[in-house]
Image (cartoon, helix red, strand yellow):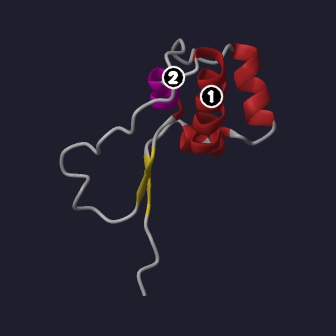
Amino acid sequence: MPATIRQKLGQLRAKATGERRKPVRRRDGEDRQPGQVLPSLAEVYESEGLPAVKQLTVGEQQVVEKLELIDFIQRINTRQRILRNVA
């Protein structure tokens, strides 16, 4: 999900400012690890210059629990590595 959001925010920024972001090199140690790194939602917001994600209010937390979305929220708020199928 954050990759989709990153792409959409990047397109909006490019239309608004007329400039594209330069590719960012991988962090130290990531070059040797296989797969693709998916940034967390907070990292996507930071890279696009948006304010940080706020904590959920009590009412929002109740809705998240009711709709059983806790795992999804934890997943998009955590940096992930997707391994490629090398066979």
Across and down, in percent, residue 84 comes to 44, 71
Mark 1, Cα crowd under 10 Å, few <14 / some 14-19 / many 20+, is some
Q: Is residue 10 left or right of residue 69?
A: left
Quadrant containing the C terminus in the rendered view: bottom left
Q: Answer whether residue 43 is magenta in the image.
A: yes
The residue closer to the viewer here, 25 or 38, is 25
Disc 2/disc 1 C-alpha distance (Å): 7 Å
In the image, the segment drawn in magenta is 42-47
Q: Residue at x 60, y 22 (%)?
A: 13
The amino acid type, in three-letter code, at marker 1 is: Leu
Q: Residue at x 45, y 25 (%)?
A: 47
Q: Residue at x 53, y 11 (%)?
A: 51
The residue closer to the viewer here, 34 or 73, is 34
The amino acid type, in three-letter code, at marker 2 is: Glu
The residue closer to the viewer here, 30 or 18, is 18
Q: Answer whether residue 46 is magenta in the image.
A: yes
The residue closer to the viewer here, 55 or 7, is 7
Secondary structure, mark 1, is helix
- Which of pointers 2 and 1 lies earlier in the amino acid sequence? 1
Please, what is the dominant secondary structure of the magenta stretch?
Answer: helix
Residue under circle 1?
9
Indicate whether 55 appears above or below 5. Answer: above
Indicate whether 7 appears above or below 47. Answer: below
Instruction: Point out which mark residue 48 bears.
Output: 2
Across and down, in percent, residue 31 comes to 24, 56
Q: Is residue 55 left or right of residue 87?
A: right
